[in-house]
Image: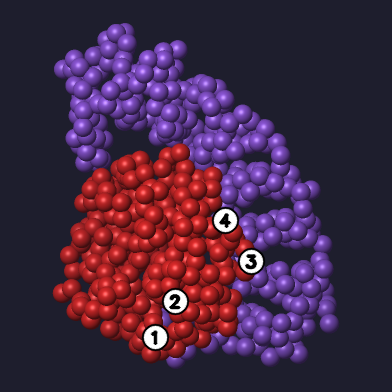
Amino acid sequence: MADSEELHLEKHVDYIKSLDKKSDFDAVAMEHLRMSGAYWGLTALDIMGRLGDMNVDEIVAWILKCQDECGGFGGNYQHDPHILYTLSAVQILCLFDRLDAVDGDKIAAYITGLQNEDGSFAGDEWGEVDTRFSYCAICCLSLLKRLDKIDLEKACDFVARCKNFDGGFGCIPGGESHAGQIFCCVGALAIGGALHHVDKDLLGWWLAERQVKSGGLNGRPEKLPDVCYSWWVLASLVIMDRVHWIDKKKLAQFILDCQDPEGGGISDRPDDAVDVFHTYFGVAGLSLLGYPGLKAIDPAYALPVDVVDRVFYGQKKQPPVS
Amino acid sequence: MAEAGEGGEVEFDWSDVEPIPQDDGPRPVVPIAYTDEFRELMDLFRAVLAKDERSARALKLTADVIAVNAANYTVWHFRRLVLDALGRDLHEELEYLDAAAEGNHKNYQIWHHRRWVVQKLGKDAVYKELEFTEGALKDDPKNYHAWSHRQWLLQELEDWKWELDYCSKLLEEDSANNSAWNQRFFVVTRCPSLGGLLQMRDSEVSYCVDFIKQVPTNESPWRYLKGLFLDDRAAFVNNSVVSEACITELVKDPNNVPAFGFLLDLLNAGFQPTSGQKEMLQKVLSAWETPSELTDAVCVRLQKVDAMRCQYWAWRRSLLPLPVAAPEIRN
């Protein structure tokens, strides 16, 4: 990429809004996870102050169509419910201040039904267990103000059991420390009020070590940097008050280097193809780094701070940052 | 009715089913432009799903959809329902999965489906499945799904101490493979036929120190070495093999970041170098006399050679003076 010293905000807004013109295989392959795709795109737009460009009613109507009678949401219409997409659906409704459109008790019942005896969560009725699902459960129920519906202590204890010798967390007890799983565990423990399980100094250093020469962050030792870790590593560090342990300027430059300055969008690393997933994580990462012109984002809920404030304190939505 | 197609595989007749088109709503949020073939396939699948038809042709249809998009989790769900309804031989399903996995080794749905199949087949399937993960790890030795799957499989067995040899083999091929180091820790701490961390510690320290000699600046073995002592500060500080290894590397390379970081951890835990070690350290770090000054000099060096994390090393430097040295239990 040529010199990308600034964020091409308008290009990214146009990119997200123009996704219907994409016909490559990646776009096709995303059909089943459109709920998450929508969350990434819409949250990125909100951070950039442009959520108002979207049609709320249409989106909410589509979200409701994706809800199964058991209360969970699928990745798209006619897809089976899954905890991942249930979280994404609730997050989008929070963005639009439309939680009133759903029955919170029903969603809570779906999530509660997925908790196992050992405190872990299955992703759906097929039983796969992963700390990602612990995060989805805790984050979603917290936004619905129904965290009391699960055994929160057991849920946090399970997450704590996934802590490794290096201070990091894996997908299950014994699973290798991985920045994505670490975000889920740290986020879950933060929301669940159990951050004391985290050795912030040890984990903070492990996370700081993710920064490589180019300034980008990788997800595990000896792996390549990827913009999505700009969120997972960074958000974890922010939650633990240790973000100053990385070189923020170099990271911001890495993210900016991953932009497509002509077509818009952000890719995993410089010169690769862009996608909405990395566009969201890049923009969210820059927001956490304090890049000017972007709304602040909550590192645990992964939603703009004003959205989270509105959920918990009922404040009117602040005007977008100019 | 089924007929044999050009490639010899069975082709089913779907003329009796009315396909259901995708309903994205008037203006899709994250709309996707489909290729025609994919669109037709998905329209047909939606109809079959709506009818809940659990037939042989439906099974083939799920394979066709999976071939185009193996990440579509709803198709996998339905495939499981159809397999159950048809009472299909799940050994054949594993063969199908071996083929479907080609190029899809990072797909959550395939791994989860494999687990479902193996759970149904029972313990007999475990060894063959371990072989499968070895194949996946040959392709990508850090494949997170493969390692997860492997950990689950091992815990179905009673004795799996030979897994340490497997880790050693992978580390011979790539000493920087953090997944293999993690797996080592998994075996050492969880394998029921081994004695646990305390009993395994000395042999693991030797093993690890050998690697550090080969790849002195790689973060994984250093972290593993520290991990072997967890919260056992006294054992950590008083293990002469460990401190010797660290100081040797520092003398060889005064810019070795993990080695300096490790020395800092030792000092913070109360390590006191012998006079011989002090002499060696004075070659690489100047202007110190007391342990406090040594710790400070190490931090200064780290701030310089690991400039990206200078804030972290500055914080280490700012910490209170060393605690009282650990009790003398010299080996």
Q: Which mark is residue A118?
A: 4
Amino acid type, mark 3: Trp
Q: Is residue B281 visible?
A: yes
Q: Residue at x 19, y 15 (%)?
A: B289
* Mark 4 residue element: loop
Chain A colour? red
Q: Which mark is residue A100?
A: 1
Query: Can you identify the residue that label 2 sits on?
Result: A89
Q: Secondary structure at mark 2?
A: helix
Secondary structure beneath dot 3 equals loop
In the image, taking residue B95 as reference, residue A192 lies left or right, namely left
The chain containing the residue under callout 4 comes to A
Mark 3 vs mark 4: same chain? yes
Say which residue appears at 30% left-offset and 60% top-offset.
A285
Q: Are marks 3 and 2 in contact (CB under 8 Å)?
A: no
Q: Which residue is mark 3?
A: A126
> Of the residues shown, which amino acid type is indicated by label 1?
Asp
Mark closer to the observer (1, 4): 4
Q: Return the chain for callout 1.
A: A
Q: Amino acid at mark 4?
A: Asp
Colour chain B is painted in: purple
In the rendered image, which quarter is residue A94 located in?
Answer: bottom left
Q: Rounded to the nearest whole Å, what is the CA distance between mark 1 and mark 3?
A: 30 Å
Q: Are marks 2 and 1 in contact (CB under 8 Å)?
A: no
Of mark 3 and mark 4, the one earlier in the sequence is: 4
In the rendered structure, which disc, 3 or 2, sits on the residue that comes first in sequence? 2
